[in-house]
Image (tube, helix red, strand yellow):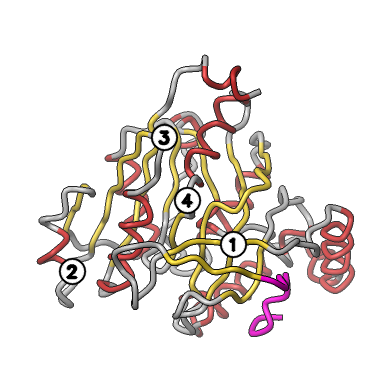
Amino acid sequence: MTSDVATLPRVRISIVTPSFRNSDWLKLCVASVADQAGVEVEHIVQDALSDDGTQEWLARDRRVQAYFEKDAGMYDAVNRGWRRSKGEILAYLNCDEQYLPGGLRAVEEFFRRRPQTDVVFADTVVVDKQGQFICCRKSLVPWKNTMWVYNPVITSSIFIRRRVLDQHGLFFDTRWRDLGDKVWTLEMVRRGLNLAVLRTYTSSFADTGENMNLKPNAIRERELVMEIAPAWVRRAKFPLHQLHRLRSLCHGLYWQKPFTYSIYTFSQPDRRVDFHVAKPTTIWWTRH
């Protein structure tokens, strides 16, 4: 299979990072994109005029294309970056997220093997502020009904082809401030895009305790999303959630053998640090 992939032309990957007052996290994020081997990557950072020192160092960092301008929120920033991008494969990575070694190469090879695929969902390692392991989050292709109550993907491990934007016009709806990614994924399913899972850990997500989806507006938007769900879905939230858990069990998502991941940390911002997980868990205890 590797030799077949080697004969296919390489494609450029464009990563967009929305930024606002997250200088320390952004430095780790940028490093994790810059050291991806075996791929052609452009990293666009859309900074909303941060006043925490971000502009001073980011403007000089040749590893990124930095744009400094006010935006209408995170999703507007991502849309702006995607419109500027030149890659065939697109993704966005928040400041408190990182790509794991070899992650983007695995994504690029997967897309090259499967030209019919529009969107790829990969797996994510959830860590704390120090980079210590919290849990594994393995993706599933979302089902139309169950995803109203549980979205089985994390955006740091979602990758799309450019045609998702150019042909389907599937940018983020900027009316949402926190739940735009869920509405975006719902729309992928509704439009019948070709979705696939890459069973590889491609990113880390830092549970900082300050993540947007834990704040009051996110809770309010979660309620708004449920208001637009079919009435029977609202009445069947519990059995649909149980159906998701059964599906996860059937796909082996609750099992993970010991493994090692490598990320940048605040204590070691210039090189990756290896973390070995002897007893992995898929349970995110602070959100279970």
Magenta segment, which residues? Answer: 278-288
Q: CA distance from mark 3 to mark 2?
A: 29 Å
**Where's residue 89, x and y in %?**
45, 35
> SS for tag 4?
loop
Residue 215 lies, with reference to residue 232, above or below; the image says below
Where residue 60 sits: x, y (%)? Answer: 10, 56
Q: Earlier in the sequence, mark 4 or mark 2?
A: 2
Say which mark, if any, is on residue 260: 1
Residue annotated with mark 4: 101
Where 243 sits versus 24, above or below? above
**Residue marked by disc 3:** 38
Q: Amino acid at mark 4?
A: Pro
Badge 3 element: loop
Question: Which of pointers 4 and 3 lies earlier in the amino acid sequence?
Answer: 3
Q: How crowded is the residue under tag 2: few (<14 C-alpha within 10 Å), some, or many (20+)? A: some
Main SS category, magenta section = loop
Residue type (three-letter) at the residue carrying disc 1: Thr
Left or right? Give the position of 152 relative to 97: right
Q: On the image, numbered disc 2 is attached to which residue?
A: 54
Residues under numbered marks 3 and 2 in contact, where contact means CB atoms less than 8 Å apart:
no
Mark 3: which amino acid?
Gly
Which label sits in the foreground, 3 or 2?
A: 3
Q: Secondary structure at mark 2?
A: helix
Q: Quadrant of the C terminus?
A: bottom right
